Amino acid sequence: MLPSGATRLTAGSYVGRMRFNDVDVVIRPKRSMPSLLTLLAEVHDLTNLVPELAGYQTTPEIVDLLIQIFLRQIDGLVRSGLKRTYVNCEEELVPVRGRIDVPRSLALHMRGRARVWCSFEDFTLNCVENQALLAALLAISPNGGLLQARRRVAHKLSGDFVGVSALPMTAKNVQAINCDRLSKHYEPVLRLAQVILASMGLSNDFGGVESNGFLLNMNSLFEKFIYRRLLHLLSPDGITVNEQSNFAFDEQQQAIIRPDLVIQSPRGLRLVADTKYKDKYKPEPADLYQMLAYCRVMHVTHGILITLGNRETRRYSVCDGETTIEVIAVNLDGSIQDIHASVDTLACQIRERLKMPC
C-alpha cells in the first residue's frame, strides 16, 4: 500500500484471481491456455482429465476451469456413492453394539450410569479421501475471489459430506494420500484438490489489504514440468535427474546452494541446470552470476539456463577458461505435441553435453 492509501499491483510469476475489498483482479498467463493446461496436467498427474481440460476453448480463465472440473468430479462421486470405510470406534452407549468392554462398563455402573462401553466397527464416510475433498470444498465456498456461482455449488456439495470431519488439510497432506483399489477412482479429483489447496494456501495479505483468491505459481509449475519431462526422457538412458538438491556453499557449511536440477550421466559426467520462467532474448546478469556460482561451487564446467521462447541456444564461454553456460529456450506455444517436442529437443541437447548419443 502506498502512502496515499492506494494499492500498487505489479506483475509477477502468479496467474489466477484475487479480490481486494470490492475489486476483482484477474491475472492471465503470458503463455496460451493450452500450454498452461499441459503444464498442469503433467505436474499434477491430471492426464486423465485432458478431455475435460479441453474446455479452455469456452472458458477464458484457468481458475474457473479448474474449479468447474473439480466440482463436476465431486458431483459425479456423490451420485455414484462416496467411499465408505470401516473405522474402529469405542463409545459409551445404552443399546449394546459390538463387543462390551466389561471392566469399563462395570466402572460406569459403579458411578450409577446405566450405560455400557462398546467397541465396534462403524461403516462411515469419514475416511481421509473424503476429508481432503471436503477441505477443498470448504476452501472454495467462502473464497470471495472466486465466482459466486462456483461458491454456491461448493457449499451445496459440502452438504453431501455429512459425518466427514472438517479437518485442516494442506496440499502436502493430500499428496501423501495413497489410494487403495477401492478409492483408485478418487485419484484425479484428489490431484485437483491438491492444486486448489496449494493455490489457496498463499499469504493473501498485501500491504495491509486483506484479500483472497486462487493463484498458480508459474515459476514453480515450469520448474516441475521440466523436471518431470526430463526425468521421463533421460532415465531410460541411465541418466539421473535430481531436483532441488542441497550443496554446501562454503567449507564451514554456513550457507547452502540449491540448483533446480543436477543431471549426471552413467559415467559420472555432471551438469547443473536452472529453470527461469522468463521470455527474454538475453538472460539477466543475476541469472548468469547464479549459474556461475553453481558451477564453481559444484566443480562443474557446464551449466544450462532453461528459459521460455522459440530461439537459438545462446552460449557463454566464461573468461575463466573453464566454465560454459548455455541458455536453452523451451517453446510453450502450440499444441501439447509441440510443447513435448520442444522438451524432447532440450533432452537431446543435454545428452550431447553429457557425451551420449541423442
Image: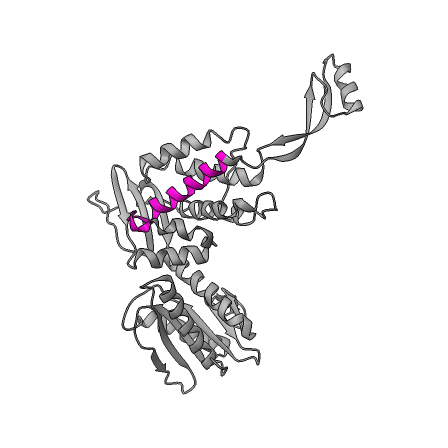
Q: Is residue 72 magenta?
A: yes
**Residue 36 located left or right of residue 2:** right
Above or below, 265 against 132 in this view is below
Residue 95 x, y percent position in the rendering: 70, 17
User: Is residue 301 visible to us here?
Assistant: no
Residue 89 x, y percent position in the rendering: 67, 30
Which residue in the rendered view is the most extreme toward the bottom?
321
Residue at (56%, 74%) from the top-left corner? 238
Residue closer to the observer: 319 or 180: 180
Residue at (56%, 49%) from the top-left corner? 176
Which residue in the rendered view is the most extreme toward the left?
4
Looking at the rendered structure, the number of numbered marks drawn on it comes to: 0
Q: What's drawn in magenta, residue-wise?
A: 56-79
Residue 59 x, y percent position in the rendering: 30, 47
Residue at (55%, 29%) from the top-left corner? 163
**Residue 6 located left or right of residue 192:** left
Residue closer to the observer: 40 or 69: 69
Q: Is residue 321 magenta?
A: no
What secondary structure characterizes most of the magenta part?
helix
Residue closer to the observer: 165 or 113: 165
Q: How is the image coloured?
A: one colour
**Residue 237 located left or right of residue 152:** right
Residue closer to the observer: 250 or 113: 113
Residue 268 x, y percent position in the rendering: 56, 79
Residue 310's quadrant in the figure? bottom left
Residue at (31%, 68%) from the top-left corner? 309
User: Is residue 183 visible to us here?
Assistant: yes
